[in-house]
Image: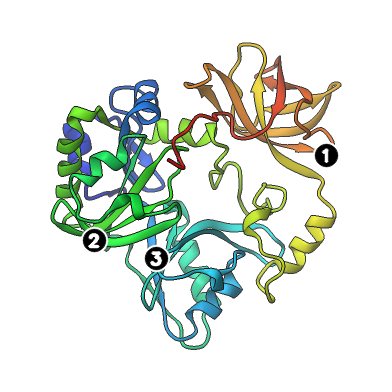
Amino acid sequence: MKEKKTPLYDRHIDLGGNVVNFGGFLLPTQYSGINQEHNAVRSKAGIFDVSHMGEFIISGSDAEKFLQKITVNDVSSLSKGEAQYSAMCFKNGGIVDDLLIYKKENVFMLVVNAANLENDLEWLKSHQEGDVKIEDISDKIGLIAVQGPRSRAILQTLTDTTLSNIQFYHFAEGRVGGKEAMIARTGYTGELGFEIYSSANEIGEIWDAIMDAGTDKGIEPAGLGCRDTLRMEMKFALYGNDIDETTNPIEAGLGWITKLGKADFIGKDAFLEAKANVTRRLVCLEMTERAIPRNGCPILMNDEIVGTITSGTMSPSLEKGIGIGYVNVPFHKSGTELIVDIRGKMKSAIVVKPPFYKNGSLMD
């Protein structure tokens, strides 16, 4: 499969980014270093290239009805200018992908994971019925995320849109750096932040304008490495690690987006059964001795395997090893002491309430 370059690829090279293949796209893992970039986002601001994400436009008179059936959240609750975190699931409850839904004037925009783009498009089209049009605009769109407590102050100098009026999980159409853009406020870091969707042809100029405007406020380009450590500290699930076709939203802690009260939708029967018979839960594990858990590490209680780590890292904010993983009921409860088998070395850990990092500026 040919590696794709995002519209910002040349800027990553110029900035000395360590570029790797991620979901078929050439993207930087880091520039100055994961810890430095992580701390910049937590204390000042970081700018991420997330142009690899997929965007689909769903239109037609039956668009809402279609999305109600194929996603787990309640699309009918959305008003124009609102965003929603959701998921598409198989009939057996396994997750096809997690995604964002934006409600525009007469259409919906879905934002999906890059690695799942083709599968998602196929899944959507295989269930298409009625007056529904599905358009893949991924190659036409560039996407930047500006995250951190200073993100609003930096962006406000580049737009006439009053950013303090954009509430969490809302968006506005406007201009950034003189270019037409959709400015959204969701985030994947636990910090105040915005996503800027614009034409792939103009996203580079927007990036340059943000970098210039943020220079005196400490903005730093940030790569995939710290995007991962930041989201792990918040227990935000990563598709392919913490959630996939073998996991259901109930056990993954996504019951809050799974609206069992709405009319029939794909996976509903499986979720009702799963809710009544939860056998494992996705939990946060903090290491109580110096060790870094990694994906695939077994979790034990009294020498018996009771779970598996799905994501793990050394937390730059907490300066200790942290892990997210599935643990059998009843060992999922906060305060439960467990053992993580890290390449044959038994290391102690404790289940803690999410998120690991509790001092973010997300709702500021």
Image: 27 above or below 95: above
Pinpoint residue 336: horizontal percent, then vertical percent.
79, 26
**Which of the two discs, 2 and 3, labels the residue nearer the N terminus?**
3
Looking at the rendered structure, which numbered label has been put on residue 174?
A: 2
Q: Amino acid at mark 1?
A: Val
Pinpoint residue 14: horizontal percent, then vertical percent.
16, 33
Give the residue number, with chain letter if any, for mark 3: 81
User: Which color mode does the image show?
Assistant: rainbow
Q: Residue at x 29, y 29 (%)?
A: 18
The answer to whether residue 363 shows anywhere in this view is yes
Q: Residue at x 60, y 74 (%)?
A: 69
**Which of the two discs, 2 and 1, labels the residue nearer the N terminus?**
2
Q: Find numbered disc 2 in the image and state the secondary structure of the residue it sits on.
A: strand
Give the residue number, with chain letter if any, for mark 1: 329
Q: Nearer the viewer, residue 298 or 214?
A: 214
Looking at the rendered structure, which numbered label has been put on residue 200?
A: none
Instruction: State the image quarter where residue 82 is shown.
Output: bottom left
Tell me whether the residue at label 3 lies in contact with that at label 1, contact meaning CB atoms closer than 8 angstroms: no
Q: Amino acid at mark 3?
A: Gly
Pinpoint residue 87: horizontal percent, then vertical percent.
57, 59
Pinpoint residue 260: horizontal percent, then vertical percent.
71, 66
Q: Residue at x 37, y 48 (%)?
A: 24
Instruction: State the image quarter where residue 180 is shown.
Output: bottom left
Q: Quadrant of the C terminus?
A: top left
The answer to whether residue 51 shows anywhere in this view is no
